[in-house]
Image (tube, helix red, strand yellow):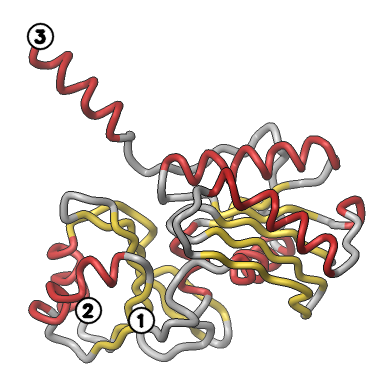
Amino acid sequence: MKILALDSSGLVASVAVTQDDNLLAEYTVNYKKTHSQTLLPMLDEICRMVELDLETIDAIAVAAGPGSFTGLRIGSATAKGLGLALKKPLIGVPTVAALAYNLYDTQGVICPIMDARRNQVYTGIFEFDEHRMSTIKPQSAMGIEELIEELNADGRDVIFLGDGVAVYKEIIMEKIKVPYSFAPVHLNKQRAGAVAALGARYYEEGRIETAMEHEPDYLRVSQAERERAEREAHKK
């Protein structure tokens, strides 16, 4: 089985191709340019380097949210366009679950955090049992201090990763009461290879959708929508 994976849900843009248990290629960039400038050129480069005919892929896995509204739209539009053109199914992979899958078979609990602004994070809590990842807390948007309280109440060792670590590291170190650590640099951000690997599990379980059906999971309304609602509320 051959899977093309895309992740543009956060600051990182990443594209990967897996075939069965092999990661054939992965191209990840965490630098200034917008995903609209990087994602398709990265895909073109991977296709050229591994002589990939996109007609031969079985499915397209895409980080489905939460994350950056613009980034999610770019990733979703790219995946949908490819899916429609190639007549291939899509696999929507929750962003924070894919992040957690970077730390396959880690002991204790895994807590991805993505900065959602206003002292909020996109997060979830995961663990591995008998080589399979299970969800302790489904992905959600919540306050960082509320999340820390939940982890303290759980009582187990926890490892944090994601772009929210850089933003909230000091708060975590001040408030956390349980043993904790931070993922190393090569595993602490989104990777399309993890989206592909978890997507392969979903594919086996029949968790696929058509390109027309796929929609990103934003978890909350955009800033523009919040501001519009506030303006309308003030007019009343």
Circle nearer the N terminus (3, 2): 2
Q: Which residue is mark 1?
A: 109
Query: Alpha carbon of mark 1 to alpha carbon of mark 2: how far?
Result: 10 Å
Q: Which residue is mark 2?
A: 154
Dot 2 falls on a residue whose secondary structure is helix
Residue sitting at x 55%, y 58%: 13
Residue sitting at x 60%, y 52%: 38
Q: Tell me whether the residue at label 3 lies in contact with that at label 1, contact meaning CB atoms closer than 8 angstroms.
A: no
Pair 3/1: label in front? 3
Q: Residue 51's spot in the image, x, y percent?
A: 90, 65
The answer to which image quadrant residue 215 occupies is top right
Q: Residue 161's spot in the image, x, y percent?
A: 37, 75
Instruction: State whether residue 131 is above or below residue 88.
Output: below
Left or right relative to 144: residue 134: right
Q: Tell me whether the residue at label 3 lies in contact with that at label 2, contact meaning CB atoms closer than 8 angstroms.
A: no
* Mark 1 neighbour density, 10 Å: few (under 14) some (14–19) many (20 or more): many
Q: Which is more toward the observer, 94 or 187?
A: 187
Indicate the amino acid at tag 3: Lys
Residue sitting at x 29%, y 88%: 181
Query: Alpha carbon of mark 3 to alpha carbon of mark 1: how far?
Result: 46 Å
Indicate the amino acid at tag 1: Val
Q: Which residue is mark 3?
A: 235
